[in-house]
């Protein structure tokens, strides 16, 4: 299966300005998951996102953790 990086890029650019940083991470992680094998690297190339950021999005998506709507980041120390 060929991954359409141009389509991923277009979707990302269309939404990027309206999403907060967490929503961008989760959206990119969902794209990578939907693309299947090779999706992670395709999303990295298409979005210019750092591997660490996308990895964090993948982990957050897999955990199913829900933050209150007013939070972008988990409480930390």
Image (cartoon, rainbow, N blue to C red):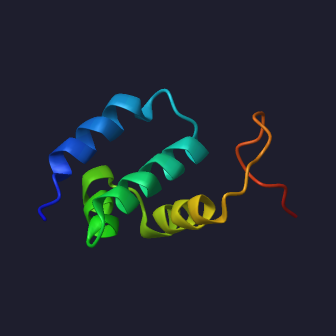
Instruction: List the single residue furthest toward the bottom.
Output: 37
Q: Quadrant of the N terminus?
A: bottom left
Return the residue nearer the eye: 71 or 77.
71
Identify the residue at horizontal 49%, vertical 44% (top origin).
24
Q: Is residue 76 left or right of residue 73?
A: right
Q: Quadrant of the C terminus?
A: bottom right
Identify the residue at horizontal 34%, vertical 40% (top origin).
12
Q: Is residue 17 left or right of residue 1?
A: right
Q: Position of residue 52 (x, y in %)?
A: 50, 69
Q: Position of residue 19 (x, y in %)?
A: 52, 33
Q: Is residue 52 left or right of residue 65?
A: left
Please give the count of numbered marks on the rendered protein. Answer: 0
Q: Is residue 36 above or below residue 13?
A: below
Residue 63, quarter of the rendered image: bottom right
Return the residue nearer the eye: 46 or 29.
29
Identify the residue at horizontal 17%, vertical 58% (top origin).
3
Q: Position of residue 33 (x, y in %)?
A: 39, 61
Identify the residue at horizontal 51%, vertical 52% (top origin).
25
Residue 71, quarter of the rendered image: top right
Q: Is residue 28 above or below residue 36?
A: above
Instruction: List the single residue furthest toward the left.
Output: 2
Q: Is residue 48 left or right of residue 71?
A: left
Q: Is residue 57 above or below residue 19?
A: below
Q: Position of residue 53 (x, y in %)?
A: 51, 62
């Amino acid at each position: 299966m060929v991954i359409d990086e141009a389509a991923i890029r277009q979707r990302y650019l269309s939404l990027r300005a309206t999403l907060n940083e967490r929503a961008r991470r989760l959206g990119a992680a969902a794209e990578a998951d939907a693309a299947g094998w090779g999706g992670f690297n395709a999303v990295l190339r298409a979005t210019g996102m750092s591997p660490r950021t996308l990895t964090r999005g993948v982990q957050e998506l897999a955990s199913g953790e829900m933050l209150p709507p007013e939070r972008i980041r988990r409480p930390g120390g």
